[in-house]
Image: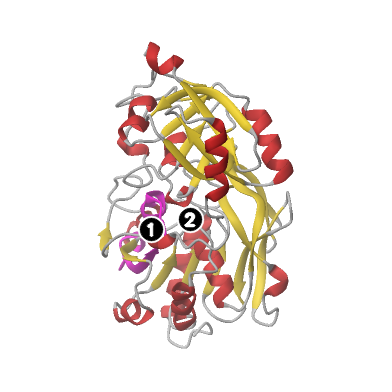
Amino acid sequence: MTDVQHRPATLALEDGRVFNGRAAGAITRRGGEVVFNTSLTGYQEVFTDPSYAGQIVCLTYPHIGNVGANVDDEESSRPYIESLIVREFSQVSSNWRSAETAQLYLNRHKIPVIWDIDTRALVRHIRSVGALRGIVATDGTPAEQLVFEAKQLPSMAGQELAGRVTCGKPYGWDKGSVEVAVSPWSEQMGESDAEAETRKHRVVAYDYGIKQNILRLLVDHNCEVYVVPAQTSAEDVLAMKPDGVFLSNGPGDPEPMGYAVENVRKMIGHVPVFGICLGHQVCGLALGGKTFKLKFGHHGSNHPVKNLLTEQVEITAQNHGFCVDPESLPSSKVEITHVNLNDHTNEGMRHKSLPLFSVQYHPEASPGPHDSHYLFTQFTDLMKEFAQPGSSRR
């Protein structure tokens, strides 16, 4: 432990800014886009969110690692962050659910950590100049070499990363968030036991980097879930005769995902579609809109969003660096349903006549508030409506 605590580490940014600290995790160096996340809890869920592929994550909460790591808190099979930046990194875990320390967990997955740096200064710098490419080194590489290497890293703009994190083959998912005989949402939604046990909704979920809590909530809402790789054709998906199609979160720039955009265009009007995060951006492009890169992105679990349909404000979990330009969407076909109250960016939309809606944020949270779980109910309601003969949504 003494060796871990006193081993030096360096964070070098493409603009020449260098932060020196102490090392934990693996002895290596990793590069990526440096972003910050403002969540107070749920660091293991952040580590394992595939949307962070290609990114170095700075956690603004000062104490990380206190509760260790366990398999139940993972959002995928492994961490996807390139590296971790924290103020204080606990070498011990103090939680009854902990299976190992965060140090051992990240070391096992070969993720380097830099800690004991001024994370507030780093966040202020990123907020001022925007997200930067950087490298975290725990192997003693000189800072000058790291700055040079950081400048050579590819920009996140233009990178198609969904293909890197998607599943290798289709699979079914049947695990809910709570192991109960009927949907845990049935009482909340006023359903009887008989209604909760009616035929399941067959949902095909495109995996652009899907989080497991999304799949759990779909199962909780009486869905029979089949997950397919990102490049699965629309024809193959429609041949499965789904009641609905879900478009997941994921990393990278949506612009290079022409295959996904074309697939969504082919499905619009033939089956209800619900997209979140990257899936929302793919919907925007499929509807004729454009996307743009945010200065430093939205990463955290305390972002206020106004639902324009209900006039209610939801506190949401977010993790995206790109956004759909609302001015680029055809107003005759698309209605903006949600707006970010911090920067007024587009957070949700729906087609005015066809069964498609999407949100930029993460209604499943994990970590984060549950204000937006109702969107999964909205999806199942849309599938029920679309299944009715003579539905106006057809």
Label 1 neighbourhood size at 10 Å, few (<14), some (14-19), many (20+)? some
- Residue 155, image x, y percentages: 56, 55
Q: Residue 344, located in which quarter of the rendered image?
A: bottom right
Residue pictured at 57% horizontal, 73% vertical = 285
Q: Residue 219, located in which quarter of the rendered image?
A: bottom left
| Viewport quadrant of the N terminus | top left
Distance in Å between CA atoms under marks 2 and 1: 9 Å
In this orientation, which residue lies closer to the viewer: 164 or 267?
Answer: 164
Residue pictured at 43% horizontal, 73% vertical = 384
Up the image or down, 119 lies above or below 169; here it is: above
Up the image or down, 39 lies above or below 216; here it is: above
- Residue 313, image x, y percentages: 68, 51
In this orientation, which residue lies closer to the viewer: 119 or 48?
Answer: 119
Image disc number at residue 337: none
In this orientation, which residue lies closer to the viewer: 23 or 227?
Answer: 23
From the viewer's perspective, tell me whether residue 319 is left or right of residue 183: right
Q: Amino acid at mark 1?
A: Arg
State the residue position of label 1: 164
Residue pictured at 26% horizontal, 64% vertical = 169
Furthest-top residue in this view = 2
State the residue position of label 2: 251
- Residue 361, image x, y percentages: 57, 54
- Quick check: can you spot residue 378? no
Up the image or down, 297 lies above or below 203; here it is: above
The answer to whether residue 373 is magenta is no
Of marks 2 and 1, which one's residue comes earlier in the chain? Answer: 1
- Residue 85, image x, y percentages: 52, 32
Up the image or down, 313 lies above or below 91; here it is: below
Q: Which residues are magenta?
A: 195-216
Question: Do the CB atoms of the residues marked 2 and 1 lie less than 8 Å apart?
Answer: yes
Label 2 neighbourhood size at 10 Å, few (<14), some (14-19), many (20+)? many
Q: Amino acid at mark 2?
A: Pro
